[in-house]
Amino acid sequence: MRTLFSASLTAICLAGSQLAVAGAVNLPGDMPAMGGHYLHFDNRFSEWQNSGSYLTNSTSLEADDRVTYDARSHGNRWQHTVRYVYGLSEDWAVGVSQGYAEARWHRSVNDDGLTSLEGSFEQAGETDLTLIGQYRLAPGAALITEFSPSTAGANPARSNTTDTGQQGDAGRGYSELGLELAANWVTELGTQWLGSVRLDATTREKVNGHGVSGPWCLAMNFGSRVNLSKDHHLVFVWHLMRGFSYKRYNASLETEASYGDQSQFALNTQYQWDLTAQLQLQSYVNLAMTQPAIEKFSSGGQKQRIELSGGTETTLGFALKAEF
């Protein structure tokens, strides 16, 4: 992690000492010009929590046969990401992105006999490599493709065991393809708007004999940029995401589980400070309301499920951007 951070910071500082040859890449839909380089280092911390219920024998028609326990889940995550994009021509750009992540979370059920459902878990390591392709549709509008190839799976480790060194997001075992249409524009009154629509699709594959996958997600963003002065700007973005049902092997439950639909509604507020013509410092806060997926599985010959109510997720971050 320290090596990744130091290398990224050094590269950004060196980039800032060169003359810029590309247009500003500040908002969704912006791309580097032909021969231009775009380098972005992002560091963020997220914390989330949810509460809900754990239901045993959940398919029984008799209320007395169903037992409900209080359940709670909370955790946090650090992530550092480096993104590089190069302008191949006036309309095409290619790039790559990778990061490092550390996540810790805990789930508790209000019953002493359900220790298999409880525990503290952690993951740490590199995230999956992402390949990036961009096509300029018009000034300020672009079609973006991102692909993360399948790599070997890695399960989260309980923090009270000796099984350490698990990967962050790398090794999920399935491939992911993202397609995004992004744009920003200025009205006759001088107001600058921005928006995007994105679809993320995943494959279902086998890792160590277990099925692994992730949700297909559809997301929409809409917002505006306010110029406080020549070098200082505020960006406000509303974010809406819907994730669809899927199945995967759950390492903590030691069985395959099915997950229902999930959603997120968030407001992201970002401050942009143009340090030089080539360097920009960004800081942001993201406040989200989440609806986690209902988790269904079988245990002891009975159908079980965990229903978490709407929760919250708060993200704080900063980023350095360089163009050269």
Image: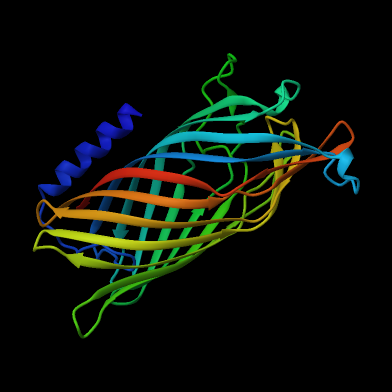
Q: Is residue 243 left or right of residue 206?
A: left
In which quadrant of the rendered image does the N terminus lie?
top left
The answer to which of 68 and 165 lies nearer the viewer is 68
The residue furthest front is 64
Residue 13 in sight here: yes
Percent of width and height locating residue 3: 31, 28
Q: Is residue 203 above or below residue 240?
A: above
**Which quadrant of the structure image shows residue 51?**
top right
Which residue is rendered at x = 28% and y = 77% of the image? 185
Percent of width and height locating residue 186: 24, 78
Q: Is residue 170 left or right of residue 36?
A: right
**Which quadrant of the structure image shows residue 62?**
top right
In which quadrant of the rendered image does the C terminus lie?
bottom left
The residue furthest top is 162
Which residue is rendered at x = 29% and y = 67% of the image? 30
Percent of width and height locating residue 222: 38, 68
Which residue is rendered at x = 48% and y = 40% of the image? 48
The residue furthest bottom is 188
Q: Is residue 96 above or below residue 108?
A: below
Q: Is residue 92 above or below residue 122?
A: below
Q: Is residue 313 left or right of residue 293?
A: left
Residue 23 in sight here: no
Which residue is rendered at x = 43% and y = 61% of the image? 239
The answer to which of 106 and 251 lies nearer the viewer is 106
The coloring applied to the image is rainbow
Percent of width and height locating residue 179: 49, 64
Q: Is residue 132 left or right of residue 35?
A: right
